[in-house]
Image (cartoon, rainbow, N blue to C red):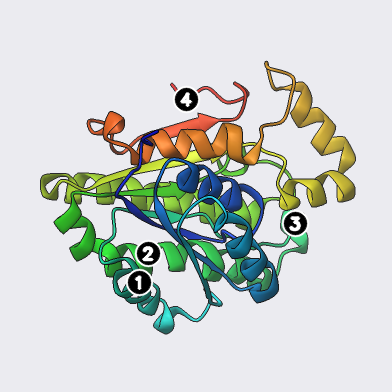
Amino acid sequence: MSGQLDGKVAIVTGGARGVAKGVATAFVREGAKVLIVDREEETGKATEAELSQIGEVAFMAMDLSRHDELPSIIDTAITRFGRLDTLVNAAQASRQLKLLDHTLADAAIAFDTGFWPTFVLMQAAYPHLAESQGSVINFGSGAGLDGMPTQASYGAAKEAIRALSKTAANEWGPDGIRINIICPFANSPGVEQWRQHFPDAYNAQIAKVPLRRIGDCELDIGRAAVFLASDAAGYITGQTLMVDGGQSRLA
């Protein structure tokens, strides 16, 4: 049976676990060859072994805050698989603190692990994506759209990624490169941590979801990413797709 992504090659940052693992899994099931990038080497190798049972997967250990080393991720994908069709920037670390408790160092974590890696990897991937007429899928968040409490630096970094994505969509559209954003709400380790530390805020957020459930990392978020990476989405760029059960509705 052919898949929607047969013959395509993707990079998924943060792909060892959570939402990004769901995306990587969905991509592999649809025929893509995937380079998973994550700083957690043990977890990354375990994910590589798991997904290698269903498709072609490689793992690369990388601390995304080492910005000068990030172009080697693109080089590794090209060396291993010969091309690049989709770059998925899903990795992100942050500290969940009220705004008045934030330090500059706390805020820097969100930008150093999310915004700047997205920026650098998009630049490094550009010539290969122009050659393949490929796409970028970046990850935003309702935390930035809605200004969720305790999510100041995380939300700010995610909104910066959305702004970067829209600019790139305009600049790179003539080159045949599509850039879209997914804002998910799913049962990731980060959301679980949020639930444990701020149960009232978590329960209030669940109550806002019209579908009354939290999304699945692979079946809900991963499948949406597959669509955006596929030829079926060939006329879609610069868009933010809310994969959050209906809790946020963009005008």
What residue do we see at 69% from left, 22% from top? Answer: 209
Mark 4: amino acid: Leu
Of the numbered discs 3 and 2, the one sitting upstream in the chain is 3
In this rendering, the label closer to the viewer, 3 or 2: 2
Q: Earlier in the sequence, mark 4 or mark 1?
A: 1
Question: Does residue 169 appear left or right of residue 45 in this picture?
Answer: left
Image coordinates for residue 180, horizontal then vertical, percent: 36, 41
How many neighbours does mark 2 have within 10 angstroms: few (below 14), some (14-19), or many (20 or more)? some
**Gap in angstroms between the C-alphas marked 1 and 2:** 23 Å
N-terminal-most mark, 3 or 4: 3
User: Are circles 3 and 4 on residues that touch, CB within 8 Å?
Assistant: no
Q: Neighbour class for label 3 at 10 Å: few (<14), some, many (≥20)?
A: many
Q: Secondary structure at mark 1?
A: helix
Please identify the quarter of the rendering in which residue 96 is found.
bottom right
Q: Earlier in the sequence, mark 1 or mark 2?
A: 1
- Label 4 residue SS: loop
Q: Residues within 10 Å of mark 1 (few under 14, many from 20)?
A: some
Q: To which quarter of the image does residue 16 belong?
A: bottom right
CA gap, disc 4 and disc 1: 39 Å
Mark 4 or 2: in front is 2
Which residue is outermost to the top?
Answer: 210
Which labelled disc corresponds to residue 119? Answer: 2
Residue at (81% x, 52% y) in the render = 193
Answer yes or no: do the residues labelled 3 and 1 have beta carbons within 8 Å? Answer: no
Name the one closer to the observer, 193 or 135. Answer: 135
Identity of the residue drawn at 44% across and 58% down: 34
Q: Amino acid at mark 3?
A: Gln
Q: Which mark is residue 250?
A: 4
Q: Is residue 242 above or below residue 183?
A: above
Q: State which mark lies toward you, 1 or 2.
A: 1
76 and 48: which is toward the camera: 48
Residue where numbered disc 3 is placed: 96
